[in-house]
Image (cartoon, helix red, strand yellow):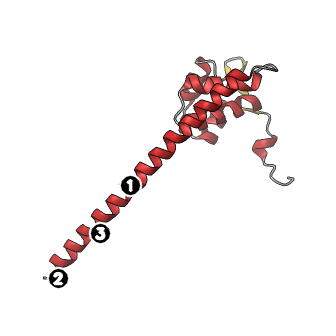
Amino acid sequence: MSGGETSKTRQTTWSIGELCREFGITARALRFYEQKGLLQPQRRGWTRVYDARDRQRLQTILRGKKAGFTLAEIREMLDLHHLREGETEKMERALLRMRQQLEVLRERRREMDEAIADLQRTIGIIEGMLKERRGR
């Protein structure tokens, strides 16, 4: 294999089970994203066959969910890849929403850092109290 190339990047289609294992999600979740129109796998009989586009879209969906975006917002982001020339309003709106969400996440991180520091101080106090009581 050449630099950075893996069997996953050379593979052209995936089954529902393969994608579930790769991304650590359930088949139910994949079917839900399909029902919502976010994924459009091909069908071979009763079997769903996902292509590289579906795999990339799934990766984007999961990243968007992790970042706190709604499925509607994720759909808009996925649709950005198919905008025609001059359709900048949607891109600007998506960029603004992404910047807003980034600030929300940064604020949550600040709050988590404060909570961690508070908890560490409390642990230190209790450990000191225990050490003192055990020393008696």
Determine the secondary structure under disc 3: helix
Residue at 76% x, 32% y: name it.
Answer: 52
Mark 2: which amino acid?
Gly
Q: Nearer the viewer, residue 2 or 90?
A: 90
Q: Are marks 2 and 1 in contact (CB under 8 Å)?
A: no
Gap between marks 3 and 1 measured at Cα: 15 Å
Gap between marks 3 and 2 measured at Cα: 16 Å
What quarter of the picture does the C terminus occupy?
Answer: bottom left
Counting from the top left corner in percent of width and height, residue 53 is at 75, 29
Mark 3: which amino acid?
Gly
Relative to 102, say whether 45 is above or below: above
- Say which of marks 3 and 2 sits in front: 3
**Location of residue 97 by image quarter:** top right
Q: Which mark is residue 114?
A: 1
Question: Is any atom of residue 88 visible in this view?
Answer: yes
Q: Nearer the viewer, residue 56 or 101?
A: 101
